[in-house]
């Protein structure tokens, strides 16, 4: 018997009907498989794919209109040299309502631990266009940058007053016809409003039995209006006392800081922005010259919140060369079991937690006491 695979068949082999039938069946299966493969490649799926996106070192530079510019630029205040990296992570979305991924792409992503398949409606609710989504994400990024500046400066001991204004008014709500967009709410029942939490507390304390007095500034003119709050029930069954408005917050910032980053949306870089500002405004290297990545929203009081796409960001951090990762504690259920080899993850709830982790990393000491994401 020959060991060559291309030996010519004998006459008996070519005349064997069962052998010819098996060969014909094999060709049919091959053709059908190719047709199915082509269909799967072409037919759109009602899903999008999350995958690691670009990584930006907030201590470094980014491309501007006139060349490279500092990603975080501090004006008219002394800054200090930094080292290593503080990486902010992004998630790249493959697919949109106008161009969905094919099923072949979906199947491939299911078997890739750095990618995730999610329903299209999660990112693009019915009636929301790609342009509207991008505009909303751009707004979230701008708001996040302002919150991060306020958080960093407060951490450094600066006074950062904030102003609460009307951004939305619900149809049929108690505020409709009384308040207008951009009205600044200065006080409730004579007590000064110093932030969003204070406004919520004042409305809740007033209750629904009697009107609350709101001191407002509209177009530079001060006035007082009365609104009787009502009770709202959330989808989880909890109730709250509301007047039916959405709000926006602005700050009187004592230090002029500019964040220069185009074509990136969402609020998830807030914590890393704040850490970058603190590093620039304080002597020494906050990270000890090491490569650290992180993610998480932040409010002006330094509270770190959950973000989307944490698994993709873990892989993005590892691919960028980070050794350490700061993750929101509220994302720990998605972190456990999905950490790439060689990356150490610490769980943080506040800006203080993040600074404590960086301090331990910079000292090169024992980091075992730092909070991590635990199973169960």
Image (tube, rainbow, N blue to C red):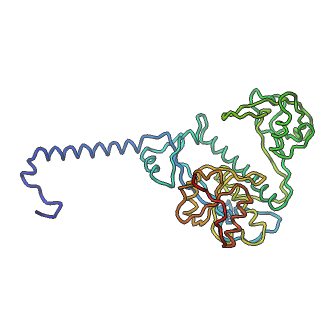
Q: Position of 131 compared to 285: left or right?
A: left
- Count of numbered badges drawn on the protein: 0
Q: Residue furthest front?
A: 376
Q: Name the quarter where the N terminus is drawn.
A: bottom left
The residue positioned 72% from the left and 60% from the top of the image is: 353
| x, y percent for residue 355 | 72, 63
Residue nearest the observer in this picture, 281 or 54: 281
Quadrant housing residue 223: top right
Position of residue 119 relative to residue 66, above or below, is above
Q: Position of 316 compared to 30: left or right?
A: right
| x, y percent for residue 171 | 74, 28
Q: Position of 64 compared to 336: left or right?
A: right
| x, y percent for residue 146 | 76, 52
Quadrant housing residue 70: bottom right
Position of residue 282 relative to residue 94, above or below, is below
Position of residue 57 relative to residue 187, above or below, is below
Position of residue 269 relative to residue 203, above or below, is below
Residue nearest the observer in this picture, 55 or 353: 353
Residue nearest the observer in this picture, 84 or 256: 84
The residue positioned 47% from the left and 50% from the top of the image is: 109
Q: Residue furthest left?
A: 11
| x, y percent for residue 137 | 66, 46
């Amino acid at each position: 018997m020959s060991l060559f695979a291309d030996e010519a068949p004998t006459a008996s082999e070519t005349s064997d009907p069962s052998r010819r039938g098996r060969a014909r069946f094999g060709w049919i299966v091959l053709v059908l498989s190719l047709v199915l493969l082509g269909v799967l490649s072409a037919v759109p799926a009602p899903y999008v794919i999350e995958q690691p996106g670009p990584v930006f070192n907030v201590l470094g530079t980014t491309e501007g209109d006139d060349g490279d510019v500092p990603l975080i630029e501090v004006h008219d205040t002394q800054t200090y040299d930094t080292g290593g990296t503080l990486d902010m992570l992004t998630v790249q979305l493959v697919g949109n309502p106008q161009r969905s991924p094919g099923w072949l792409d979906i199947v491939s992503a299911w078997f890739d631990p750095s990618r995730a398949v999610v329903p299209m409606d999660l990112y693009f609710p019915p009636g929301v266009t790609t342009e509207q989504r991008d505009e909303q994400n751009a707004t979230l990024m701008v708001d996040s940058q302002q919150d991060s500046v306020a958080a960093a400066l407060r951490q450094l001991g600066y006074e950062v007053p904030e102003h609460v204004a009307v951004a939305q008014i619900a149809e049929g709500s108690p505020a409709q016809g009384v308040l207008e967009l951009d009205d600044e709410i200065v006080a409730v029942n004579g007590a000064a409003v110093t932030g969003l939490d204070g406004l919520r507390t004042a409305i809740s304390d007033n209750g629904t039995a009697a009107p609350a007095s709101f001191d407002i500034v509209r177009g530079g003119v001060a006035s007082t209006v009365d609104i009787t709050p009502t009770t709202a029930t959330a989808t989880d069954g909890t109730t709250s006392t509301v007047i039916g408005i959405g709000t926006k917050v602005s700050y009187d910032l004592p230090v002029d800081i500019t964040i220069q980053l185009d074509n990136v949306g969402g609020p998830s870089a807030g914590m890393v922005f704040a850490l970058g500002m603190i590093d620039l405004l304080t002597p020494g290297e906050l990270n000890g010259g090491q490569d650290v990545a992180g993610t998480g929203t932040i409010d002006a009081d330094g509270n770190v919140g959950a973000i989307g796409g944490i698994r993709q960001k873990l892989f993005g951090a590892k691919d960028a060369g980070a050794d350490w990762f700061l993750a929101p504690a509220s994302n720990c259920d998605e972190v456990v079991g999905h950490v790439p080899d060689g990356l150490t993850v610490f769980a943080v709830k506040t800006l203080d937690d993040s600074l404590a982790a960086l301090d331990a990393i910079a000292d090169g000491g024992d980091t075992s006491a730092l909070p991590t994401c635990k199973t169960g």
